[in-house]
Image: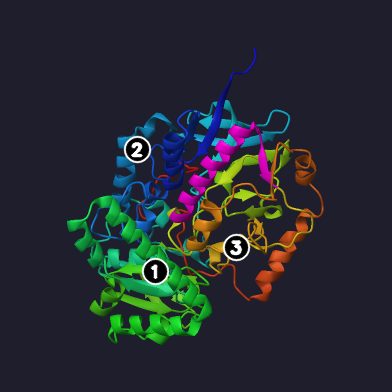
């Protein structure tokens, strides 16, 4: 008996903010296109449904993080996970997007068949059964990190600790930390969010960091928005606010790259004012890297600094010697006891939602690929990875990708094309795709794709430039190849040369003297609980 294979024009992988935006755009701009969204979890939202740790919020403004087609109307411009989820659920409900979403299913494999000009996709249901979809175009909206497991350094004596270990990525929602002594390990966005949130109820919170991060404070609400929202329609207000914050984001990034000492001094002055002498700014808030070599952490209304000033939070900047039965021993000899330890120690980068991606039966190896316009890859046909900005709001780049995909599909339809891929010549110059020195990036250099030295292979993460280069430029260029699959099989066939790029990236990492195992940023998800708090493993998602 022949297996039934469903046919679709487009298959979207993931129903987080990226996948829902792609779903909306296809519905509005290409109503005749057949498509579906595969979501591994039982809810939409991706990141904003997965993480449950105290205080979880966006690390960028919501005027640019929210969609342009659905204005953010809350007065708080740094959105909590609850508000973001409500916003996304409202979109799904108002636009009937749930009609397209298939929950608790995962794309486990996808093979491009050049003879048929489609992706043959294997989808696994929650009960373990599989079915196949033949999709002409594959849009991966699964983010870039492992939903099942984050990064956890190998701490000496880790298993000796007898208290409660609460990992941000698998937070035990019934955990009562009232009156408890808490240690939070890390200095990235997760740590600076968790610390002031837990300090409100905890007896005391100690933030343990190996090295500091750049942290700056902004008011939780915007004066201009409060004024404009009273006198202008939501759509106009939204456009003004998006223009304001998109410009500020880019200005901050460009100034940081061109005048790093000036930006370092500016952030230091802000930190010193917010601390008001409660902590040594040159010990605990002086990173050993330049601004925007790693993402800068945003805190609303100086909540982290206020927590330090109040005495509820202490910051310790030192290396961890080992875990003990009651807490942590630092290399300086200082012993810190705690009832609860929160290791906010980083993400585990994962490509394409862990799906097994192949072209004509040959595995697609991430570090052999070169990124095209921040969304497609060399010699990978009919495939788009929605990957947002690392130096600005994720959604700004995601929306440029939605528009580009719709234009590309329209062009192919009008000209009768069945396949398209960016073609890169052999031995073309390649450099690292992400210009960040964050721990999660450095640890994944031997897995992630590269980029080229010039546009369209080089993506500078500058939104205002990308608006013209991607949204308003001619679609067809000298790189895109239509209905030309002849070179694909040879490109993806395993060969000894594939290891060359890995060695080059490792050499680059060594030359920059960046420790890939640095405990500085992000969240961790390996779960260890010693005191009756045993969080159930969250279901893996590809959203």
Separation of disc 3 and disc 1 at Cα? 30 Å
Residue lying at 52% horizontally and 66% vertically, measured from the top left = 155
Q: Please provide percent x and percent y for residue 280.
A: 36, 86
The residue carrying mark 2 is: 92
The mark closer to the camera, 3 or 1, is: 1
Residue 443, numbered circle: 3
Q: Residues within 10 Å of mark 2 (few under 14, many from 20)?
A: some
Separation of disc 2 and disc 1 at Cα? 30 Å
Residue 439, numbered circle: none
Residue lying at 77% horizontally and 60% vertically, measured from the top left = 500
What secondary structure is found at the residue carrying circle 3? loop
**Pick the front one: 520 or 268:** 268
Residue lying at 77% horizontally and 40% vertically, measured from the top left = 489
What secondary structure is found at the residue carrying circle 2? helix
User: Residues in magenta?
Assistant: 396-422
Above or below for 44 versus 279 = above
On screen, residue 465 versus residue 495, left or right, reads left
**Pick the front one: 219 or 109:** 219
What secondary structure is found at the residue carrying circle 1? helix
Separation of disc 2 and disc 3 at Cα? 36 Å
Residue 248, numbered circle: 1
């Amino acid at each position: 008996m022949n297996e039934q294979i469903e046919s679709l024009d487009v298959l979207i992988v993931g129903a987080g903010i990226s996948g829902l935006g792609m779903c909306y755009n296809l519905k509005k701009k290409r109503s005749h296109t057949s498509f579906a969204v595969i979501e591994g979890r039982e809810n939409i939202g991706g990141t904003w449904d997965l993480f449950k740790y105290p205080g979880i919020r966006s690390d960028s403004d919501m005027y640019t993080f929210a969609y342009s087609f659905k204005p953010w109307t809350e007065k708080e411009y740094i959105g909590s996970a609850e508000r973001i989820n409500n916003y996304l659920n409202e979109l799904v409900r108002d636009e009937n997007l749930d009609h397209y979403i298939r929950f608790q299913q995962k794309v486990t494999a996808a093979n491009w068949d050049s003879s048929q000009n489609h992706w043959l996709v294997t989808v696994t249901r929650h009960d373990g059964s599989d079915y196949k979809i033949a999709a002409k175009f594959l849009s991966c909206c699964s983010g870039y990190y492992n939903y099942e497991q984050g990064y956890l350094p190998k701490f000496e004596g880790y298993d000796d600790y007898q208290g409660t270990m609460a990992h941000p990525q698998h937070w035990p929602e019934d955990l009562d930390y009232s009156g408890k002594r808490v240690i939070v390990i890390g200095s990235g966005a997760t740590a600076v969010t968790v610390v002031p949130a837990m300090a409100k109820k905890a007896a005391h919170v100690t933030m343990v960091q190996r090295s500091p991060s750049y942290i700056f404070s902004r008011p939780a609400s915007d004066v201009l928005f409060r004024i404009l929202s009273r006198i202008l329609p939501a759509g106009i207000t939204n456009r003004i606010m998006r223009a304001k914050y998109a410009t500020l984001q880019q200005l901050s990034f460009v100034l940081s790259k061109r005048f790093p000492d000036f930006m370092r001094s500016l952030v230091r002055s802000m930190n010193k004012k917010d601390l008001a002498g409660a902590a040594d700014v040159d010990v605990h808030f002086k990173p050993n890297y330049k601004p925007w070599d790693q993402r800068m952490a945003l805190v609303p209304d100086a909540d982290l600094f206020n927590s330090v000033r109040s005495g509820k939070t202490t910051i310790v900047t030192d290396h961890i010697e080992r875990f003990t039965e009651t807490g942590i021993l630092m290399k300086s000899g200082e012993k810190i006891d705690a009832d609860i330890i929160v290791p906010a120690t980083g993400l585990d980068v994962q490509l394409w939602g862990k799906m097994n991606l192949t072209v004509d039966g040959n595995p697609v190896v991430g570090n052999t690929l070169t990124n095209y316009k921040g969304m497609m890859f060399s010699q990978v046909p009919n495939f788009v990875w929605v990957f947002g900005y690392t130096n600005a709001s994720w959604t700004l780049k995601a929306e440029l990708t939605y528009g580009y995909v719709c234009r590309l599909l329209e062009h192919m339809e009008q000209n009768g094309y069945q396949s398209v891929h960016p073609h890169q010549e052999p031995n073309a110059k390649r450099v690292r795709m992400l210009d960040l020195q964050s721990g999660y990036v450095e640890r994944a250099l031997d897995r992630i794709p590269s980029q080229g030295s010039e546009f369209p292979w080089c993506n500078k993460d500058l939104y205002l430039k990308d608006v013209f280069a991607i949204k308003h430029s001619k679609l067809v260029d000298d790189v895109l190849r239509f209905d030309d699959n002849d070179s694909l099989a040879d490109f993806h066939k395993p060969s000894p040369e594939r290891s060359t790029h890995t060695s080059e990236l490792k050499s680059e990492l060594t030359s920059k003297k960046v420790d890939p195992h640095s405990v500085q940023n992000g969240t961790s998800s390996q779960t260890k609980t010693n005191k009756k708090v045993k969080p159930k493993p969250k279901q893996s998602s590809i959203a």
